[in-house]
Amino acid sequence: MNNITRFNPLSSELARFDPFLDVDDIFNRFMLRPLFREGVEIEPQIRMDVKEADGKYLVSAEIPGVNKDDIHVTVDGNRVSISAEVKQEKEAKEGERVIRSERSYGMASRSFTLADEVDQSKVEAKYNNGMLELTLPKKPGASRKEIAIS
């Protein structure tokens, strides 16, 4: 059985030439690789799934390591925006002496357009264990509103 490993363009592993790679993959692998930033994490991303069922949209967004107060969801008609302030801190110690300390802060955001407008008065948002769950009922003629996360 083959093990599949996600490619990390910032890893220090040797790259193997694969003639069947997509042009974008080749560009990202060789042209955008910052030589001076070895070991630095890639900027935070929000990964999500959007499903449609029973007259509503269901969104599952993976935003690990973020406080719910740092997440902002806005709905403007059929456009949904999710943004979060991401803070990552790592510290490695050897005895009492700090050997390495890494911190990264930044914003992660995703916006997408749905086929139908959303009824903002019935939108539900829940955040638990790094997963943001949105329930977006369909309705034409909605205006922009910030959604409180429970």
Image: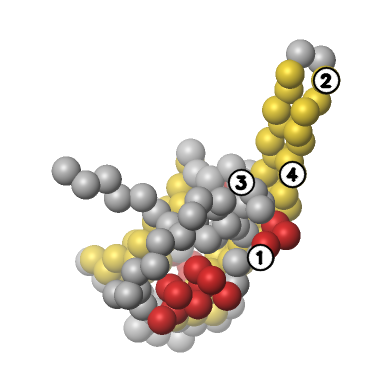
Q: Nearer the viewer, mark 1 or mark 2?
A: 1
The reply to whether dot 3 and dot 1 touch (C-beta < 8 Å) is no
Comparing 142 with 36, the one in front is: 36
Q: Nearer the viewer, mark 3 or mark 1?
A: 1
Q: Earlier in the sequence, mark 2 or mark 3?
A: 3
| Residue 20: image location, x then y, percent | 29, 75
Q: Which residue is mark 1?
A: 34
Q: Secondary structure at mark 1?
A: loop
Q: Secondary structure at mark 3?
A: loop
Residue furthest to the bottom in view is 141
Q: Which residue is mark 3?
A: 66
Q: Earlier in the sequence, mark 1 or mark 4?
A: 1
The reply to whether dot 1 and dot 4 touch (C-beta < 8 Å) is no
Q: Nearer the viewer, mark 1 or mark 4?
A: 1
- For badge 3, the amino acid type reads Val
The circle drawn on residue 97 is: 2
